[in-house]
Amino acid sequence: MNPFHNQSVVSIRDLGRDRLEAVFEATDRIRTMPPERRRELCRGRTLGYVFYEPSTRTRLSFEAAMSSLGGSSLGHADAASSSAKKGESLADTVRTISAYSDVVVLRHPLDGSSRFAAEVSSKPVINAGSGTEEHPTQALLDIYTIKKEKGRVDGLNIGIVGDLKHGRTVYSLLYGLSGYDVNVHLVSPPSLRIRPEFAYGTKRRMKMSTYGDLGECAGEMDVLYVTRIQRERFADAEEYAKVRGSYVVGLDMLRRMRPDSIIMHPLPRVDEIAPEVDSTPHARYFEQAEYGKHVRAALLHLLLNKDA
Ligand code: NCD
């Protein structure tokens, strides 16, 4: 039996490097499979979802992934159109969706929401973003993108720039990378540095260094992972105003980087990557979004099929 079968995916910390690599192998298999075979993998299965926060790529790529496997999706893209608006609890909403589906995908503004949902759900839950805490499937597709675009993960210099304090994709990515032998460069304004809790309980093979200015380390980077300032997570609007627009990756920055370095971003982007970067060979964020569909298809296949 495959170890993913019927298991919830709440935190990437629950998956070691071996499990990550198993998802990547399944992704390679599924991507190259003839579409008619792929459509047999989850035929007749249903993905249920509820998103209490906005989403474009995560929700649509899960739907596209399920459809490519021959399954279907149902759910709410907006909590305001669900009974949450009438005051229904998260527990009741999740119980109900899990009764109509084989796997439940949840995005919610609270840390811990996904772990709680997994406890009350009768079906496996996939965390599609829980507060500032984690977004494990984003990290899976991020590391898969690094592997495909750079040919390896071990030995790379990876810069993570932006809102390291509030960005859940950053935490999942760091936890995921902690099983690899990488040099991580964390770049942010002082008020948006990584939360100290990150240091607890992480078995780190990676080396980490911190910078206030991207220019200091740009020349060393193989991968630059840029993130948006998470405006909606600031307790104080003035604090946001102070850091807004404080870093932008533009053509001038690319000139300081290695010619074969790549730029990634979980998206949505606001103004932290200049649009002129899109047409350079460094830009990989749209490829990254596309890999997301295949990685999520692989994960659904593994969760839903005992013998996958
Ligand atoms: C991210 C998220 O929701 O955390 N979006 C995504 O799923 N790619 C990143 C963000 O909102 O900045």
Image (cartoon, rainbow, N blue to C red):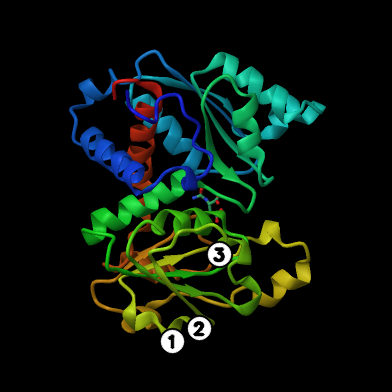
Furthest residue in direction bottom, as rendered: 216
Contact flag, marks 2 and 1 (Cβ < 8 Å): yes
* Mark 2 touches mark 3? (CB < 8 Å): no
Q: Which residue is mark 2?
A: 213
107 vs 226, left or right, is right
- Left or right: residue 110 versus residue 160 is right
Residue 102 percent location from the top left of the image = 48, 19
Q: Secondary structure at mark 3?
A: helix
Quarter of the image with the C terminus in it: top left
Q: Is residue 184 left or right of residue 129?
A: left
The residue where tag 3 is placed is 199
Q: Quadrant of the N terminus?
A: top left
Identified at 47% across, 43% down, the residue is 14
As displayed, is residue 223 above or below residue 167? below
Residue 92, above or below 129: above
Where, by quadrant of the figure, is residue 151 drawn? bottom left
Q: Secondary structure at mark 2?
A: loop
